[in-house]
Image (tube, rainbow, N blue to C red):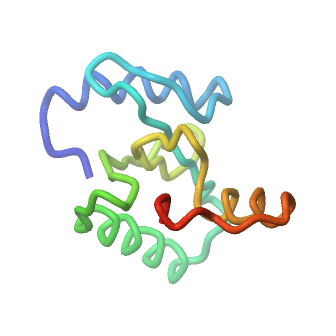
Amino acid sequence: MVTKLQDLTLLRNWVKIIQSGESCCEATGWPGVCIQTVNISRLNDKERVNALNEVRFLASIRHRNIIGYKAAFIDESSQSLCIIMEFANDGDLLGKVQDQRKKGQLIPEAEI
């Protein structure tokens, strides 16, 4: 969750981005980040707890090969859980594997 007072200023801008329908963008202070949103209005209590536990888990992980967690908050107006993470320019691992499979090639060992 948000841990610094300066983060609150940035979050006001994020809310505008979420409400406009954007999914990825850059912001002053946090270049190269994206927002993942989950509509929590349709989740039951157990699913909401699970979503918040996933955020706590993401916040606890620090590894150079795992997308970095930045912050999370709930936007009341859109009933969305918003998770701010590093942006992966080259996409995710699943996409990379599928692209290589379509080409009929293996991922080079040096990349793995």
Looking at the image, which is closer to me, 1 or 111?
A: 111
**Residue 11: x percent and y percent?**
35, 29
Looking at the image, which is closer to me, 45 or 100?
A: 100
**Residue 36: x percent and y percent?**
54, 48
Is residue 76 shown left or right of residue 96?
Answer: left
User: Hey, which residue is sitting farthest left in the picture?
Assistant: 4
The residue located at (43%, 76%) in the rendering is 49
Looking at the image, which is closer to me, 101 or 84?
A: 101
**Residue 59: x percent and y percent?**
27, 61
Q: Is residue 79 above or below residue 17?
A: below
Q: Quadrant of residue 7?
A: top left
User: Hey, which residue is sitting farthest top in the picture?
Assistant: 28
The residue located at (63%, 59%) in the rendering is 41
Is residue 36 shown left or right of residue 42?
Answer: left
The residue located at (44%, 28%) in the rendering is 14
**Residue 86: x percent and y percent?**
40, 43
Q: Is residue 11 above or below residue 45?
A: above
Q: Quadrant of residue 9?
A: top left
Is residue 19 shown left or right of residue 13?
Answer: right
Q: Number of labelled discs? A: 0
The residue located at (55%, 78%) in the rendering is 47
Is residue 80 shown left or right of residue 6?
Answer: right
Q: Is residue 71 above or below residue 104?
A: above
Q: Is residue 20 above or below residue 47?
A: above
